[in-house]
Image (cartoon, rainbow, N blue to C red):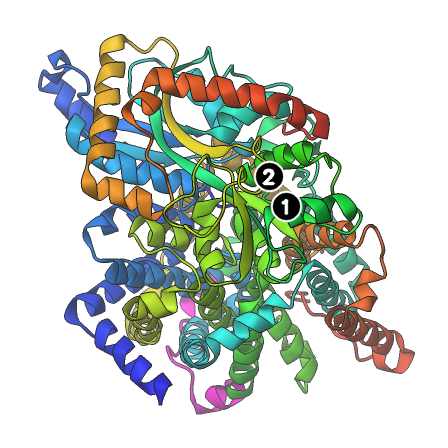
Amino acid sequence: MDLFSNLALGFGVALSLKNLALCFVGCFIGTLIGVLPGVGPIATIAMLLPITFGIDPVGALIMLAGIYYGAQYGGSTTAILVNIPGEATSVVTTLDGHQMAKQGRAGVALGISAIGSFIAGSVATVLIAALGAPLTKLALLFGPAEYFSLMVMGLCFAVVLARGSILKAIAMIMLGLLLSTIGTDLETGQERMTFGFAPLSDGLDFAVLAMGIFGFAEVIKNLENPETRDVVRQKVGRLLPNREEMRQSAGPIARGTVLGSILGILPGNGAVLGPFASYTLEKKLAKDPSRFGRGAIEGVAGPESANNAGAQTSFIPLLTLGIPPNAVMALMVGAMTIHGVIPGPQVMTKNPQLFWGMIASMWIGNLMLLIINLPLIGLWVKLLKVPYRLMFPAILLFCCIGIYSINNSPVDVAMTAFFGLFGYALVKFGFEPAPLLLGYVLGKLLEEKMRQALIISRGSFMTFVERPISAGLLLVALVILVVALLPSISKKRDVVFTENS
Amino acid sequence: MTTLTRRAALGAAAIAASLALSNGAQAQAYPNKPITMMVAFAAGGPTDVIARIVSEHMSKTLGQQIIIENVAGAGGTTTTARVAAAAPDGYTLIMGQMGTHAAAPALYPNLRYNPVTDFTPIGVAGITPIVIVTKKDFPANNLREFVAYVKANPDKVNQAHAGVGSTAFTTCVLLKAQMGVPKLNAVAYRGTGPALNDLVGGQVDFMCDQVTNLTPQIIAGNIKAMGIATPARIAVLPNVPTTAEGGLPDYQISGWNAIFGPKGLPADIQAKLVDALDKALEDPTTNKRLADLGTVIPNKTERAPAGLAAILARDLALLDKPLRETGAVGQ
């Protein structure tokens, strides 16, 4: 079969000693920078670009790709250990992952996230190899109208499943949507809600918001209460999930992989929805949804698998079409062009070594991440034993470095501090930050896609129901709403994003 | 969100530089410490790629590392303003382009720099031809049919661009003005990638952009090329006719990237940089890497400081009126 000969070619390339070493270096660096809060793959890949000039293109791209999925993986370590999501995709991991850490199950959480990520990564790699080209065609059916409807559906999940604090959850989502409108208007170039303050003209950075309302706020909260922190330190527990936990996680991993893979292919960063969708689904399927937010292993296994699957499949549009679906992939395009490979539909035929070599190296990279990370879990967990008076300055320092590195902007660091205070106030008043971040992440796409769709349709809202895929997605959203509003069912509604009672 | 930093490298460079200074190297001629070349856009973009390819060879000639620093924001104008205000010592340069220098004055009412008087031109690093492309099932097959169809169906046709101030935006504003349909529906995307994605997917009808981004899709048949806005056909797309062949001879525009220093750069420093750029563009490897991107290397007169000043003056005049008439602002 063609696929096998191609994969054989790919593994032949990826298994050369040099490429194995580069893959390892990439994954290792990626894990490290992923663990450091705020230091993201974009900054790292850009910094390392000049170093790759001396390497051949295949090796260079294998290493850079390794950094990317290594960072995706490492980001969950920080989310679990210190409750700071490094990337939009690890916001969900903080919910149950950090709770598990507080209960002394940090090792289990890290372990299941490593295992889930590996399984998801392996499946996604096979998917890219076998179905890359047809899937690209499918993704191209998604125009602005479809995208808008997908985002509406995503928001419905979040609204519907919030209970008890439903009003607060909606308020947070709305606030997130509002925050996402800060900055330069895409159509007219006019500034909105910036109060003439120049640093706001490009909008708030996700990292600024996330580090602030999660990271800084978490530090303030912990400093207020040193005793609870000590409890976390004393309990370390097992380092790996046991058989029962593996059994509980199997379903979530499988479903998360499927969801993450599908959403990862979509252009325009659809991958961010993956973990949210997976978490919602797992909570809905669970026999006892109240465990979620209190350290449910399914709430880590599912979203982490979705996250990693999405990270892998977001390579599909880049490899098969040459069009980058997100900022990191745009940087990979740059890396390819600098190395003299012009990204486009021809890469597969003109540079088969590169194409199949990268795909093979993805699987090898996932294996390496597992090998790198399982032994490291013990080390990460020991970090929790470090006295908090030493930990928190280090966390703050790394956050500041990371935020500064995004734009070379000291204002960003100051804004993060502001959002830290804001996040602390939210916690005090019983508002959860996760829906705010979801609203923020979806808000930009929601507005952008709605306006694009309306411009194309000459202002007709019918475009959202006339297009079959879009109509289907809106229908699903409507069904979810109706089902939730039926009183008998609404009693069973549960809280998606409430961290603790 | 796509920006990043070279601060760590700069930090190391600063330490290296201070060590060099303590060794009495300050007596040495320019350059005696690493040079920063600012790129006002995200790493990996067309401007960044050209800056990295050219600076790699220039570093060899100058004997000092050129460090690329990407700081994006406000269509590149923030960083361009920063370079305009920098000390004219030759250690801060910018890889400018059509948007930051020729289009910005018409789009940004409060622009904090004058692209002509606030900079010392060094030279043009590359000229990238602009090609007009449509989705693959668009009813027109050549530029004449395209213009006729657009004029007959202005309420049906949608144009995509990569955001106010982008090359795709600017060059299409000029095209629409020359076709006599300045108000044609334009859909804004966040960058060339998403815009191209929707063009390939058939969600929008046409766009104009640099060949670098479009060539692979044209060759693959995912989109159709209507015309290329250069005086002669180009090597990477030999089958695509020029706009003159297609009956739109006035539509002549190219994207360009050029190195500028702050105003008042001493003549000897300027000369050294001009020489380093010349050597880079004449180097066969660098030359080929740029040519593979679809970039045209200007000849020595065109790329010299005077040639750059001429290109800048021409494009400022060409773009001013059509851009102001769109009413779009960057700010």
Question: Residue A363 shows which numbered tag?
Answer: none
In this picture, residue A479 sits left or right of residue B11 = right
Residue plotted at (73% across, 61% down): A145
In this picture, residue B300 sits left or right of residue B38 = left
Residue that extends furthest to the right in the rendered view of this protein: A487
The chain holding disc 1 is: B
Query: Does A316 sit above or below residue A286?
Result: above
Residue type for callout 1: Arg
Q: CA distance from mark 2 to mark 1?
A: 6 Å
Residue B75 occupies quadrant? top right
Residue type for callout 2: Gly
**Residue that numbered label 1 is attached to:** B144
Magenta stretch in the rendered image: A230-249
**Residue that numbered label 2 is attached to:** B247
The location of residue B271, given as percent across then percent down, is 23, 15
The location of residue A453, given as percent across then percent down, is 74, 55
Q: Are marks 2 and 1 in contact (CB under 8 Å)?
A: yes
For the residue labelled by badge 2, is the local secondary structure a helix, a strand or a loop? loop
The chain holding disc 2 is: B
Mark 2 Cα shell of 10 Å, populated few (<14), some (14-19), many (≥20)? few
Residue plotted at (39% across, 21% down): B308
In this picture, residue A83 sits left or right of residue B237 = right
